[in-house]
Structures are given as C-alpha cells and as structure tokens.
Amino acid sequence: MNQMILMGFAIVLGLLIITLVILVINLNKTKTARRVSQRYHDERQLLNIHIFELPPGVEKIPRQEMFGALRSIFKVFKSLDYKKSNIADFSKQQWHSWQVGILFRFYKMEHEFPIDHPEDIFPEDILTLKDKDLRFLLNDIMVRYKRDVELDRTRDSLSRDIRWSGRDIAIIFYFLSRYKEYAL
C-alpha cells in the first residue's frame, strides 16, 4: 500500500513538473512574440523623411543635377513599360540603391514630380492604391532602405547594389507625382 501511495505521489509530482516546464516555455514564447511584434510595429511607424538619412554622396548632389538625375531615372522607368509587363518583370530586382537614394532625396527636397497621364505609365494595382496604402508601401521601402543600405558606401558601390524592383520604383514615383496631396 505504501508503494502505491509513493507511486501516486511520484506521478502527481512528475505531472506538476511537466506542467511547470510547459508554462515556462509558453511564457518565453509569448515574450519573444511580443518583442517581435513590437519590433514590427516600430518599423510600421511612418518614417519622417526630413530626418531620413541618405548616403552623403546623394545628399551632396547639387539641386540642378538632382532634377536631371531624376528625369533620367524616370525616362528609364518609363521605357521599361511596366504597365504592359508581367508581374515577374515588375517584381524583378533591377534598380540600385543609388537611384532609390536620388528618389528619396527628391522627396526630402519636398518637390512634386508631375507625371502626365499616369494611367499610361503605372500598372492598375499602383493607380488604384488608397492613399493610406500608398503611404505605407512607401514607408516599407524607406524602412528597407534604412535597414539594408550601408550609408557610407560610395556611388559606385551603391550603383552595384541592385535590390529594388520596378514595383518599388513605381510606388516612389507615383507618390512623388502626388506629393502635393500629401504635403502638410
């Protein structure tokens, strides 16, 4: 009889220990999930373009040269005719960090980039974006730029850093074309 009581006590004690271990594991998972969720939430905050850092080489481009560079980038963008291309071409990474830096510098300068007949240039999914969605997509690109681009790199190095899709460029250009609607 004493062996049965000891055996029962051992089983109950074992179950209690297993339950405690499971609780501790679940608490750690919850804390980790909260930290990851908080980190994601922090990145989802809209970044302020006025304090957004760009490579020094991009920041130092003279104003007139900026306008010329932006027009050249848009000319290439337009010639790729993403409106008629398939989703794979639109999603393909073929733009470099120097070009994206120039686009963000233009945004920092608080200029609108008027585009005549945007319906002839941008795919339908870009044209039908709600304002809030366009802002968040632009912000996501800014977060990736801030996180992934090494700001101390040279123009040549950033020009070899091909990581941006036609969709990314389209979102930035479409936002810039409507900048006056967003300016405070």
Image: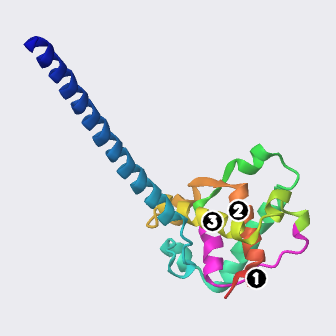
Sequence-wise first label, 1 or 2: 2
Label 1 neighbourhood size at 10 Å, few (<14), some (14-19), many (20+)? few
The x and y percentages for residue 166 are 73, 56
- Tell me the magenta residue range: 100-118
Sequence-wise first label, 3 or 1: 3
The residue where tag 3 is placed is: 100
Do the CB atoms of the residues marked 3 and 1 lie less than 8 Å apart? no
Q: Secondary structure at mark 2?
A: helix
Q: Residue furthest front?
A: 1
User: Which quadrant is the C terminus positioned in?
Assistant: bottom right
Which amino acid lies under the numbered mark 2 shown in the image of this protein?
Ile
Q: Residue at x 75, y 62 (%)?
A: 170
Position of 153 relative to 92 (above/below): below
Q: Residue at x 28, y 42 (%)?
A: 24
The residue where tag 2 is placed is: 169
In this rendering, position of residue 32 left or right of residue 156: left
Q: Residue at x 58, y 79 (%)?
A: 61
Q: Quadrant of residue 183?
A: bottom right
The x and y percentages for residue 2 are 8, 14
Q: Secondary structure at mark 1?
A: helix
Q: Nearer the viewer, mark 3 or mark 1?
A: 1
Return the residue nearer the eye: 77 or 24: 24
Q: CA distance from mark 1 to mark 2?
A: 19 Å
Indicate which disc residue 123 carries: none
Which amino acid lies under the numbered mark 3 shown in the image of this protein?
Val
Return the residue nearer the eye: 30 or 127: 30
The x and y percentages for residue 66 are 66, 79
The residue where tag 1 is placed is: 181
User: Which quadrant is the N terminus positioned in?
Assistant: top left
Label 2 neighbourhood size at 10 Å, few (<14), some (14-19), many (20+)? many
Which amino acid lies under the numbered mark 1 shown in the image of this protein?
Glu
